[in-house]
Image (tube, grey):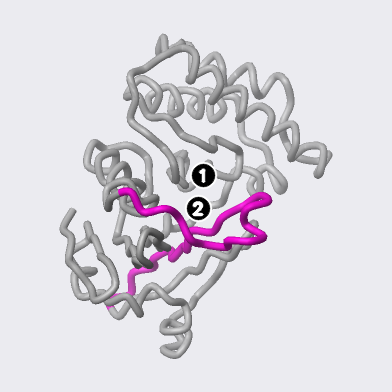
Amino acid sequence: MQIKTTPFGHIAWCEPSAKDLTPQDFAVDVWQTKNAVVGQSKGRYTTWFVKTDSAQIWVLRHYWRGGLIGKFNRDRYLYTGLKHTRAMAELAILETLYQEGFAVPRPIAAHVERFDIRYRADIMIEHVAGAKDLVAYLSQQPIDEQQWYALGQTIAKFHLRGVYHADLNAKNILLAHERFYLIDFDRGELRQPDKGWQQANLDRLLRSFNKEQTKLPSLAFSQQCWQQLIDGYQSLNAI
């Protein structure tokens, strides 16, 4: 990762073609003026898909606050050092995992803008071609037993590496070309492997599947699917 100083903060980049990015490039308006916005994903807030001059597709995401505090402070965070900002921390963990061959999107760049003791931030990652999040996929078709088993093994590999995912849920798992990816490592950490947080990660994932099925009863998920995932997870002695 390389970092440069801007008039109001910093930009870090992992992808060489991103070295010339400016703070303005982290605003979707700039991409819209170039007719380079090629898609979006709507959750609590909108994530944008933008096309570069070299025809790469990048995902642009701003960091927004949620919950009650988000009603009064939409996107400002306390600045306690550059490496502790949410964007730089997420970019760093993605770079480590990507270089080690884990199934994560390729990290591109991050932007931190300072306001005295506060900051706001953005991150860019590469779009995983052909990917659907697991809820979108299972709402249209099931995955087979071997795939559930493989998903369990994928999660186990992350846990054995000590990857704590702060929000492991079904929408933060992508399926593309028979491979599962984990996304959104905001507030994620590299920790000492421990059965406590690993089990809590799995419990959170199961709750998310059950919650999504409550909203969409036709979702192709069952207790048997979950057991196949756990069988795959335990096959690597992760817990």
Q: Position of residue 74 (x, y in %)?
A: 57, 63
- Left or right of 129, for residue 91: left
**Could you say which is closer to the camera, residue 41 or residue 179?**
41
The numbered mark, 1 or 2, whose residue comes first in the sequence reads 2
- Residue at which label 2 appears: 131
- Residue at which label 1 appears: 175
Q: Are marks 1 and 2 in contact (CB under 8 Å)?
A: yes
Is 233 placed above or below 51 here?
Answer: above
**Could you say which is closer to the camera, residue 187 or residue 104?**
187
Q: Residues within 10 Å of mark 2 (few under 14, many from 20)?
A: some
Q: Residue at x 47, y 40 (%)?
A: 178
Is 67 placed above or below 8 here?
Answer: above
First to last magenta residue range? 54-80
Q: Residue at x 54, y 35 (%)?
A: 168
- Left or right of 184, for residue 221: right
Q: Residue at x 46, y 62 (%)?
A: 61
Q: Position of residue 192 (x, y in %)?
A: 33, 19
The reply to whether the magenta stretch includes residue 55 is yes
Q: Amino acid at mark 2?
A: Ala
Say which mark, if any, is on residue 136.
Answer: none
Is 234 placed above or below 159 here?
Answer: above
Q: What SS does tag 1 mark?
A: strand
